[in-house]
Amino acid sequence: MARYDVTVRGAGIFGLSIAYEAAKRGAKVQVIETVAIGAGSSGGLVGALTPHVPDSWNEKKAFQLESLLMAQAFWDGVAQAGGVDAGYARLGRLQPIEGLAGVDMARARTAGAAQNWGNHAVWEVRAATGAVWEPVSPSGYLVHDSLSARVHPRRAGAALEAAIAALGGRVIVGDAADQGHVIWATGLAGLADLGRDLGKPMGGGVKGQAALLEWDAGTLAQIYADNLHIVPHSDGTVAIGSTSETTWEDAAATDDRLDEVIARARAIVPALAAARVIDRWAGIRPRAITRAPILGAWPNRAGHFVANGGFKIGFGMAPKIAQVMADLVLEARDSIPPDFRL
C-alpha cells in the first residue's frame, strides 16, 4: 500500500496547486475530494487573474504581485509535467474610465505602477479607438494594464490533476484515510468547520453566476467594466461574470440575475451582441471574514493546516500560496504574510 507524506483535502485551485507544488518538491501526495474536481467556485468559467490598483501599496498587494509574476512559470511547469494546457496567457486588461476626474486618478496611478510594479508591467491611460474589442467608455479613455492574465478554470483543474499524477501523486474523488500532514482546502464547508472548532466566525459564502459565450477573441485583452469581468479564452469562448449574491435559494441555479449580467456585457462590448450563450454556471465562493486568504497551521491539531478563503482572487494567488504552504508544511519555514495568518 502506498504511503503518503501529505494529504490535501479539497480539489479546488488552492488544494490542487499546493498538492502540485509539494509533489514537485518530492513529497508523496494524495488529494481527497468528496464531490468533484473544482466542485466549488474553482469549477467556474471566468478565470480572471487581475491585480489590485498599484497605489496605496501594502503586503497583500505585494504578495499578489509576486504570485501574478510567478504564474507563467507555474502554469508552464504544470503543462510540462502533466501534458495538459490550462489556457494561461498574460494578455492584459482594458477598463473604461467614467469621467474626467477618473482620468486624472487613473493617470496618477501610473506613477504607483512604476514604483510598485517596477519594469514587470505597466498601468497606462490611453484614448479609446472604437475598436471592435473595446469597452464603451463615457470619458473616451481606457486604462490598460499589462499585468492581468487569464486561465481557463476547468482546464486548470484538469491540468493540475494530470501534473500531480505524473509526479507520483493521486487525486481521489470519494474518500480515503488521511496520511502524513493534512492540508484543509475545503472552501465554504472548511470555513464553517474551522469556525466551529475555534468558536468564532471565520467567513461565509457569496454566490456568483457566470456565462460562457461563443465568440473568438483570440489573444485580445480581457475587459473589466461595470463590475464585470469579460475574459476571452483560448478555446474560442468569452467568459462573463459575475454576480455577488449574499442570499439565495439554490446555490447551483442560474436565474434572471445572470440574464442581466449577459445583457450588461453585450452593452459594454457590442461585438458580443449576437454571441450565443453556450454555458451558464452558478456556485458559492468562500470569503474569509478578513476578505484575505486564511493560511497556516490549524490550532490544536498537530500536523493539520488550512488554506482557504480565496474569494475572487484564488487563481491569481494560487502559485504563491502553493509556495508558502509547501514551505510551511514540508520545510517548517513560515513566510505567510500577517494579514493572511490564521
Image: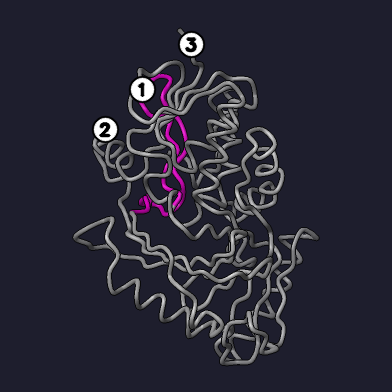
What residue is shown at x 45% (from left), y 23% (from top)? Answer: 7
Question: Who is closer to the viewer here, 317 or 166?
Answer: 166
Q: Are marks 3 and 2 in contact (CB under 8 Å)?
A: no
Residue 229: % across, % down: 51, 69
Screen quadrant of the N terminus? top left
In the rendering, which numbered label is found on residue 146? none
Q: Amino acid at mark 2?
A: Asp
Q: CA distance from mark 3 to mark 1?
A: 21 Å
Is 301 within the magenta?
yes
Which of the 4 quarters of the picture holds residue 307? top left
SS of the residue under disc 3 = loop
Is 121 within the magenta?
no
Q: Which residue is mark 2?
A: 197
Give the mark nearer the N terminus: 3 vs 1.
Answer: 3
Q: Which residue is mark 1?
A: 301
SS of the residue under disc 1 = loop
Q: Amino acid at mark 1?
A: Arg
Q: Residue furthest right?
A: 119
Residue 29: % across, % down: 52, 22
SS of the residue under disc 2 = helix
Stretch in magenta: 284-310
Residue 37: % across, % down: 42, 40
Q: Which residue is mark 3?
A: 3
Which of the 4 quarters of the picture holds residue 321? top right
Screen quadrant of the C terminus? top left
Question: Who is closer to the viewer here, 279 or 50?
Answer: 279
What residue is shown at x 63% (from left), y 48% (from top)? Answer: 67
Question: Who is closer to the viewer here, 234 or 295?
Answer: 234
Give the mark nearer the N terminus: 2 vs 1.
Answer: 2
Query: From the viewer's perspective, is residue 57 above or below residue 99?
Result: above
Sort mark 3 into few (<14), some (14-19) or many (20+) by Cα contacts within 10 Å. Answer: few
Query: From the viewer's perspective, is residue 59 above or below residue 268?
Result: above
